Amino acid sequence: MAPTGRHLWPDLPYPSLSATPGRLLAMARAYAVSGDARLRAGVETGIGHFCEHVYAAGADPVGNWWDWEIGAPKRLLDAAVLVGLSGRQGGALLEAVDHFVPPDRLRDYDGTSTGANRVDLCLVTLLRAVLGADAERADLAVRALAPVFRYVTEGDGFYRDGSFLQHDTVPYQGGYGLVLLEGLATLFAVLRGSPWEVTDPNRRIVYDSVERSFVPFTHAGHVMDLVSGRGIARDPSGGELRFRRLAGAVRRLALTATPAERRRWRTLVDGAGEQPTGHRLFPMSARAVHRAPGWCAALSMSSDRIAHYEHGNGENLRGWHTGSGMLYWWGEGHGAHYADGFWATVDPYRLPGTTVSTRRLPDGAGEAWGGACPPFRWAGGATDGHYATAGQHLRGLESTVEAFKSWFFLDDAVVCLGAGITGRDGAPVETVVDNRRTAALLTVDDANGWAHLARHGGYVVRDGGVLRRLREHRPGGGMTRPYVTLWLGHGLDPSDARYDYLLLPNATVAATRARAADPGWARVLANTTSQQGVHVPSAGVTAVNFWQPGTAGPLSASGPCAVLVTERGDGSATVTVSDPRRDLTELTVTWNRPVAAVTGRPAALTGARTGRRLTLTFGPLPDSVSVTVRPGGGG
């Protein structure tokens, strides 16, 4: 430390609102461990200098509000409490915090005082209360947490389906959600047994969020990128680092959790626990996660509620197409596939699963902070907890490209359909089948419409499309990585183009060849701008995404919806229905199959007729709802 002018260290020029408080906090932590008086004196001098020249009461904040209200004061107050700062320096810090984070900052739950930001502001207020021995301020800090403990139906916070949003439109369990969980876990533990213990009964949603909101988006010791916002561009190993933070937060939260929760969480925090197979759909954030034996997939979509992507503070400037139906998947031995420099080196116009215009976009295209949303509402799907159908009415970012995209998630495959692919950008449009960070052997049989990537899996193109491919080494971020890219070209300014292909994770060459030779394995019922659907006899699955009312195969619907029928070996069947647009007041679904009885009725079911065909009538649908029936009879 060499205090001169307006800086404490010559390599950290003014205003250094992050690095300088960070160094002071590191010194304070070292003092707390060692008791070295020189460290304490250095922290006192440093805070006094910083509060005189930078973080001073009455100073004009420059740059991002967050640095002045959360980032700098949290670190400075933490350091001050650790060294027991008092006197002139302590008074100056208290005055500065009162200036930038006055008590009325916690009065209204809106703007930038919501979700993770609200928790951080409460932490700052509590630390200020500790340093200033202010019991009233401590009361305020705890009371102001209350809005965080309520499920929301729009904007920032936790949703009942497990979604978590920040900045209104960005799924963020891997970023702001982590900050929120870390902060609350700390507050719950530190305040336990004190007059300020957090006792709000609604705090239960925080404990529930571990398994409802966070764990589903982890795989192989990583937090998935599709819920990490602009943070994906920060570090080549970001997913692994985020998982370590999540594990630390869960361990801390476990200190105040129930014994049953502590037992369940134990394997989660060390990354060793295998998650059960099945499907989780998060309609309020346009995300889905599918787990099957040996592989996992995750889908990232956008809608009029969920942003194409987020950029801000100069970060994630080329994440344009991450919400255009990006399909992540991890096979055996590839748990870190999207780490190790993926985002720094991948072609941002060729993200797996997406349908995009190749027209060049400027860095940071679209409004920052998640402000760029497409105009269409249909994004979501239906799941019975094992299988799922998902769909997205796509509009490209700053593009005329429009498409209807569907995914059908099964035991060993994902069936991918696209229809109505149209664009007038004056540029070719592509659907990216995959883009793998690998130098593995690629085997292609154009005549029979399949390809196989060694140690990854197989691909089957079923509508006569030509699977194009590229092998390249791509530089970025001071590194170079190998890629194999597979895509379908739709031509320049296409009109009503379509696609139909299978993704086969972990499949061998022989299994891929066999699936290509068996077109009846998954029969397409419809692939149009009105409906997209498939029938998979071996799985007993029939699924249709209804973009418009109508009929596809044995299923009919009176309005836009997603329908999944699963016939089971015990003679029962489930009909699962959802309203991805979230605007229906009534819906009628017909399964043209004899049904003897309805054996399980959800609350949303308002009417059912059995016999030669099954007709179900629903009121408003909150999420996927399943009706259990016994096929047969019908007269």
Image: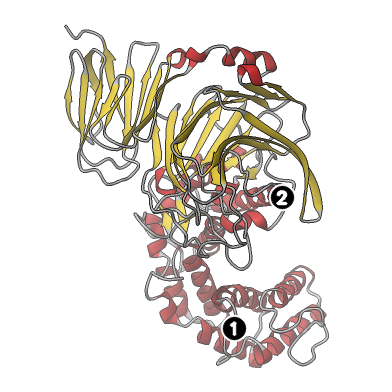
Q: Identify which amino acid the numbered label 1 is placed on.
A: Val
Q: In the rendered view, would you say 614 is above or below 490?
A: above
Relative to 273, say whether 206 is above or below: below
- In this view, the residue in front, 124 or 213, is 213
Rendered residue at 72%/50% (across/down): 237
Residue at the spot of label 1: 62
Color theme of the render: secondary structure
Q: Nearer the viewer, residue 238 or 138?
A: 238
The answer for how far apart the CA atoms under marks 1 and 2 are is 31 Å
Task: Tell me which numbered mark, 1 or 2, is placed earlier along the sequence.
Answer: 1
At label 2, which amino acid type do we have?
Ser
Left-right relation of 355 to 346: left
What kind of element bears circle 1?
A: loop
Q: Residue at x 77, y 70 (%)?
A: 30
Residue to which mark 2 is pinned: 237
Question: Where is residue 310 drawn, in percent x and y?
Answer: 54, 59
Residue 262 showing in the rendered view: no
* Image quadrant containing the N terminus: bottom right
Q: Secondary structure at mark 2?
A: loop
Determine whether 528 is above or below 136 in the image. above
Q: Relative to residue 327, is residue 118 drawn left or right?
A: left
Residue drawn at point x = 63 percent, y = 21 percent: 450
Give the image location of residue 293, x and y in percent.
58, 24
Question: Which numbered tag is attached to residue 54?
Answer: none
Locate residue 100, reporting x and y percent.
52, 83
Q: Is residue 536 visible?
A: yes
